Image: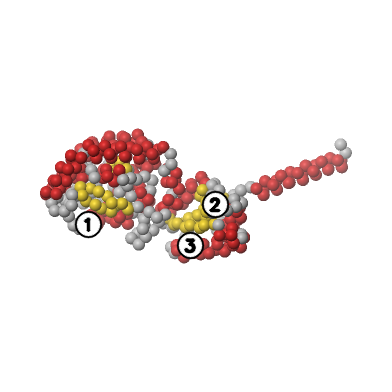
Amino acid sequence: MGTNSMHNAIGVETLERSKQQAKVVSIAPDVGMHSQEAFSRRLHLEQRRTERSRRPFILLLMEAAPEADPGIWQRVQAVVASSVRETDIRGWYQEESVFGVIFTEIGAELESIRKILLDKLSAALLHRLSEVQAGSITFSFCSFPEDWNKQSPRGDAPSSLYPEAKFKKLGLAPLSKRALDIAGSLGALVVAAPLFLTIAVAVKLTSKGPVLFRQKRVGQYGRDFTFLKFRSMTANNDPRIHEEYVKKMIAGTLSASNESNADGKAVFKLTNDNRITPVGKWLRKTSLDELPQFINVLNGEMSLVGPRPPIPYEVEAYDIWHRRRLLAVKPGITGLWQVTGRSKTTFDDMVRLDLQYAKTWSLWMDVKILLQTPRAVIVGEGAR
């Protein structure tokens, strides 16, 4: 082969290689983009970081109308990439369907920041897309930590912040747990029917007021429900005693000397409460005041096994990370902390046990906890 022919061959080969490289570059994914799995991990990581730093973040979700051109996402991603900071996290919240951006290190004025972000991104989309295309994109915002307070109802948006909770609802595991709940609660209500009647008569004859105590409690995702117990206290009592006690317990300012059992061991529970009736003391010691909660289980508001449902004023005193106990699983009549530490467990340790249960849950674990519960009740170290 002559020198010119060799040079020509090398030139053609180099040109073809350059074309291939250019093609790869043109279709390569944006290195700042995350897949659905990676984006979900980053969302989880930012939640943990916020729990420590207390610096909120905003999650923006962008969803295209079903009739929108699938190719629209490439232009949307380009608009977002040029409109957000390098530190903001971009990726698929739901692959090829819902695009998400996590705006980190956000200041306290969340509402005004949301408006600024919405105006900025809407204007950028209108500049790069047609009016019809831009109109097919729907924006939704939520912030972490959620504003769980008296002015803002709980349970409205956490499902967006916790996509893993949505996926846990799928499959046989949740169905098997619900099947156990239905079978167990129905069986308990049938077998304990005579006991229900006996307790109702005893409560009614020994103190004024209704047989059942109804109380607002906070369930999964922060949703309120009506919690049922046999009344063990005098009617129309002042809840401030318990409220003050609980807030001290959650804050960790409750000393062991505040409450102790007969052996002098610390008991993290209000034991010397003069609001409790004589029949109520017996009901609480045997945990029979809990029997009506099988109705809550049958209604789907609670489970046989899970974290105990808190009172709203308890949730108001929660640290950010404490709220996780309300997200992964439904509240339960009994749980891991009841059969291990029970009322001698500090509040933080109780939450850790609840989170451990949610993370390692299995149907066999529920069965074991249910089998261990009667012994914990007989030992009598404090049902709640």
Q: In which quarter of the image is residue 81?
A: bottom right
Q: How crowded is mark 1: few (under 14 residues within 10 Å), some or many (20 or more)?
A: few
Q: x, y percentage for residue 211? A: 18, 49
- Quarter occupied by the N terminus: top right
Residue at mark 2: 66
Q: Which residue is drawn at 38% across and 46% down?
A: 328
Alpha carbon distance from label 3 to label 1:
38 Å
Viewer-side residue, 193 vs 318: 193
Under mark 1, the amino acid is: Pro
Q: Which residue is drawn at 52% across and 54% down?
A: 63
Residue 170 visible within the image: yes
Under mark 3, the amino acid is: Arg
Residue at mark 1: 239
Mark 1 vs 2, N-terminal side: 2
Residue 265 visible within the image: no
Viewer-side residue, 114 vs 50: 114
Q: x, y percentage for residue 364? A: 35, 34
> SS class of the residue under badge 1?
loop
- Find residue 114 and name its label: 3
Q: Residue at x 32, y 40 (%)?
A: 181
Q: x, y percentage for residue 180? A: 33, 37
